[in-house]
Image (cartoon, rainbow, N blue to C red):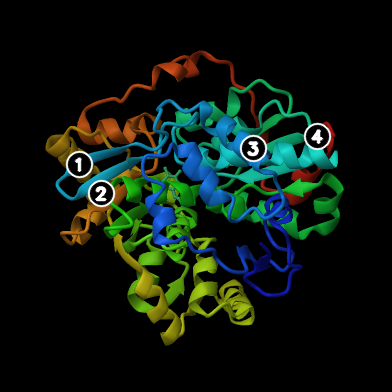
Amino acid sequence: MRYISTRGQAPILSFGEAMLTGLARDGGLYVPESIPVLTHDEIADLAGQSYEEVAFRITSRFTGDTFSEAELKSAIAKAYAGFGHAARAPLVQLAPGHHLLELFHGPTLAFKDFAMQLIGQLFQIALAREGRKITIVGATSGDTGSAAIEAFRGLDNVDVFILFPHGRVSEVQRRQMTTPSEANVHALALEGDFDDCQSRLKDMFNHFEFRDGVGLAGVNSINWARVLAQVVYYFTAAVSLGAPGRKISFTVPTGNFGDIFAGYIAKSMGLPIDQLVIATNQNDILHRCLSTGRYEMNGVKASISPSMDIQISSNFERALFMAYGQDGAAVAQLMDEMKTTGGFTVSQGALEALREIYASGRVSEAETSAEITAELARSGELLCPHSAVGVAVANAQIAAPVPMVTLATAHPAKFPDAVEAASGIRPALPARMADLFDRPERVTRVPNDLAALEALIHERRRA
Ligand SMILES: *Cc1c(COP(=O)(O)O)cnc(C)c1O
């Protein structure tokens, strides 16, 4: 299995190389050269298997010879052992024909743990084998950073630096990043917003001398290994509802497009997914693009579903690459136009290709809160604001007899203020992390300045 860049100008890599690299050197994102297809029988045979067994059968199709069967199986077993639910990704019925896929039983209470816990294990195997040390730098609006720290804390051959926007993450999110006490964990509160964090991270990747000097590695949502890990739960959910004998639709609360792109991969592998619905909050660049063909930045407005507050959606580049028939030059041109003018228009053919696969909907702040209240009354489920965006969009898209699955991307206790304001109920943290508010915090305030950040990383890393 070989991996190519969406911009067509970077070296072709193995799975292991693409995983450790993150962003391609031409600025593009790695995608598999071709997508393996499972037969009807192979999909049917996933029914009743453990989450870990399904994860092995899916991911092993993409990992080439980077890992032995024993290594991959052991990594998967360790990755999900710390989850708070034996099913890992349980399904709950909300209404006839509508199900909620709970992806928040991992150590940091958001779906990011599914991918991050696995790549933490895979990185460890690959680095130990090569005797290599790396520096992971990540930018986060809250959930990615805590998931990355949880996955890499205490590892000898990895230092992990997380940039988060000072004062703009929830207290639970911040504490999950600042309370781990291991010496290889560095939480950095940047004076700026999430876009500033992402921009400085991109600058570091484009500064090749720094990148190579510290062994910079990326684990943000553009890392292909993360997308791959997320393909698994589309299979477990669909098969438990009757696939491959029956079509299933999914609605996905979307920001950077990593999670829903995993759904597209599952569909391309032969899983009979009917609708794949993008749910956005008021930061609706994706919904506008699908509706009008124009992809255009217009600022970020802080919302009660902050993990979806994005101005541009990085993994959408992969969807464009597919919609443009894997034409890297065309994608590179769109991205250039984006950089110089702040937007681009998708060609008619590509727009039709996108609409074949994705539907979309957008929810306002008031509608999000109202959905939390309404779902509590309907089914007794207390939703986090991101999941509420999903459920609200899904309700408008359900087309019987095809069952709809909405992805619940975070636990309500991760966003207690917004949930309490909407429902009057303050959700409690699960018992296994009930002491989060008593643990001491450790954080460094940093300026929004590339040279200062690079100097700090050079000084702090232990390698
Ligand atoms: C990251 C995140 C999202 C958005 O996922 P993408 O893969 O970036 O589209 C939605 N909800 C929660 C809770 C998240 O942490």
Of mark 2 and mark 1, the one earlier in the sequence is 1
Q: What residue type is labelled 4?
A: Arg
For this view, does 155 lie left or right of residue 316?
Answer: right
Identify the element where label 1 is drawn.
strand
As drawn, 189 above or below 303: above
Q: In which quarter of the image is the C terminus?
A: top right
Residue highlighted by disc 2: 391
Which of the numbered marks, if any, corresponds to residue 120?
3
Q: What residue type is labelled 1?
A: Leu
Residue at the (26%, 58%) spot, across then down: 246
Which of the numbered marks, if any, corresponds to residue 94?
1
Mark 1–mark 3 Cα distance, whole angstroms, equals: 33 Å
For disc 4, the neighbor class at 10 Å (few under 14, some 14 to 19, many from 20) is some
For this view, does 74 lie left or right of residue 80?
Answer: right
Residue 168 showing in the rendered view: no
Mark nearest the camera among 3 and 2 is 3
Of mark 1 and mark 3, the one earlier in the sequence is 1
Identify the element where label 4 is drawn.
loop
Identify the element where label 2 is drawn.
helix
For disc 2, the neighbor class at 10 Å (few under 14, some 14 to 19, many from 20) is many
